[in-house]
Amino acid sequence: MDETQIETLSAHPRVKAAGERTVIGLCTAGVFAKEYGEVSFMDDNNARWNYALPTVGRTPKTGKEIAMDTKALALLGCGIPSAMYRQTAKQSVVERLREAET
């Protein structure tokens, strides 16, 4: 769909809410060879509809933030967070994702 079609459908009186989701890539190698992983952007509406709202922390607000489920973090060897990762931990997660694909 293009932006005009999205705006037209979203403005229709029978549409109660709209959401956005963009799949950026799939993780299918390394630790994700047997456990499907997806890298995507989704707005808060789409996150709610996909049961992907965080139970700890908050949804990412900038392009430098990520949200991951605890199973994916465990596969990457990052452990289970008790709060949102700081920048150094986020860099570690990104590095581990890159390593997982090789």
Image: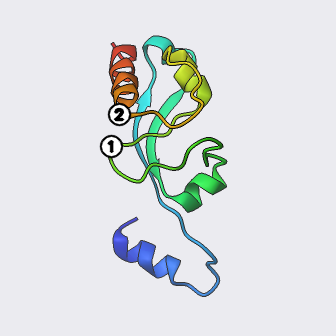
Q: Is residue 83 left or right of residue 94?
A: right
Colouring method of the image: rainbow
Amino acid under disc 1 = Lys
Residue 27 quadrant: top left
Q: Quadrant of the N terminus?
A: bottom left
Residue 35 is situated, as x and y percent measured from the top left of the image, at: 57, 20
Which residue is the site of mark 1?
64
Three-letter code for the amino acid on which mark 2 is drawn: Gln
Do the residues bearing badges 1 and 2 touch, measured as CB atoms within 8 Å?
A: yes
The crowding category of the residue bearing disc 1, from other C-alpha atoms within 10 Å (few below 14, some 14 to 19, many at least 20), is few
Image height of 43 relative to 32, above or below: below
Q: Is residue 71 above or below residue 87?
A: above
Label 2 secondary element: helix
Of mark 1 and mark 2, the one earlier in the sequence is: 1
Please name the residue shown 45% across and 81% down the image. 8
Q: Nearer the viewer, residue 14 or 85?
A: 85
* Residue 46 percent coordinates (x, y): 57, 57
Residue 71 x/y as whole percent? 61, 24
Q: Nearer the viewer, residue 45 or 34?
A: 45
* Residue 87 marker: 2
Residue 85 x, y percent position in the rendering: 46, 33
Q: Foreground: 74 or 84? A: 84
Quadrant location of the C terminus? top left
Numbered disc 1: secondary structure: loop
